[in-house]
Amino acid sequence: MKTQFIYQLCFVICFALLVSCSSEDDGNSNDPSDNLITINIAEYPSSGDLITTINSGLEGNLNYSITFETSSQAAILNGNELRVGDWLAFDYETNENLFVTVDVSNGESFETIEYKLDITDVDDIWAFLNGNTRTAYEDASPGEWVWITENDYNNLFNYLAETSKSGASDNQLFNNNSVQQVQGGKTFANTNQNSMPEDHYFFAFKYYSWSSNATSNRVKLSETSTESSFSSIGEILPEHDDGFNHFVLKGVNTKTMSEAYLGLYVSLKIGAKDDNASSYNHGEGNTATLDDNVLGKVLLQQGLSTSLKQWD
């Protein structure tokens, strides 16, 4: 009987210890790993967009604070609402997902909730076009140049990752020198050393047309020199008028294999400016070889490229 009593006593003690440990574990149930919530969010949302409303198991007047973020200010709080802060942090090419930890407290107890924001990839070019230009881009086939606005062009350079400009620099395009006309019917390329990097996708182009109703123009690229081996990139540029015109190329899949040089066949006239640090080559007609050179001038044409494919 004494032995049986000892066994019963041991059982009671073990059970009490088990209950005690279980209670302590319950007290740690607010560990972030137990409260991980996954939310899908499209790439490039707008600042202030609602991500989620924070639901807490605590009662009373609650205070919310962000205690950790993968990218600073990616998300912000508005009461119990988690909203987009820095929208550029939601770039799939930079961050496929973001983690945000929120602490909730009523003054006596606290709860920690961790959010995993899975970013859904979109066509980055499409994301930075607006209105009619976005529609035109959607409707275009791969290889087509789509006319876009100056604002669209600037957004593509500013917000797409790892972009580079080739051809005329911004300073050459927009300095105070007057724009001069250069007769067309030729293929042109600047020789100002502002080339396109190796292993880049060439996706956008701008130039100054001296003529309205310009047709038959072809954007060109040479991976050899500013004098030879120019080949057409994409289809014929859509008809456009005088002044600066901007275009984006749909569905680029090929990278440059070496340093490359931007060219353009112009059927009518192109704009140029005086520039002592530059010259340009040209050849008659839509040609691959540019035999002639003009000193002290820069053609107003520029390309955008990137090392990352960020579109469909």
Image (spheres, rainbow, N blue to C red):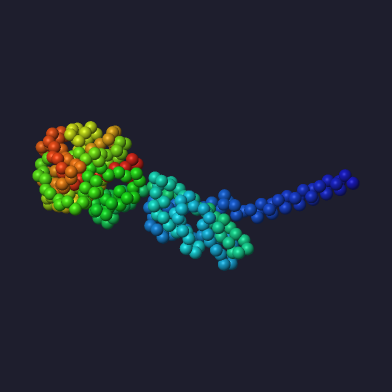
Judge whether 37 appears above or below 107 on screen: above
Picture quarter with the C terminus: top left
Viewer-side residue, 240 vs 198 = 198
| Residue 232 at x, y percent in the picture | 20, 38
Side (left or right) of 287 relative to 29: left
Taking the spot 75% from the left edge, 50% from the top edge, the residue there is 17
Judge whether 174 appears above or below 107 on screen: above
Res. 30 in view: yes
Taking the spot 58% from the left edge, 62% from the top edge, the residue there is 105
How many labels, in total? 0
| Residue 262 at x, y percent in the picture | 22, 40
Taking the spot 15% from the left edge, 46% from the top edge, the residue there is 274
Taking the spot 16% from the left edge, 44% from the top edge, the residue there is 297
Judge whether 195 appears above or below 42 on screen: above
Res. 247 in view: no
Q: Which residue sits furthest right?
A: 1
Side (left or right) of 102 relative to 45: right
Q: Which residue sits furthest front?
A: 276
| Residue 86 at x, y percent in the picture | 41, 55
Judge whether 10 appears above or below 59 on screen: above
Viewer-side residue, 248 vs 206 = 206
Viewer-side residue, 138 vs 222 = 222
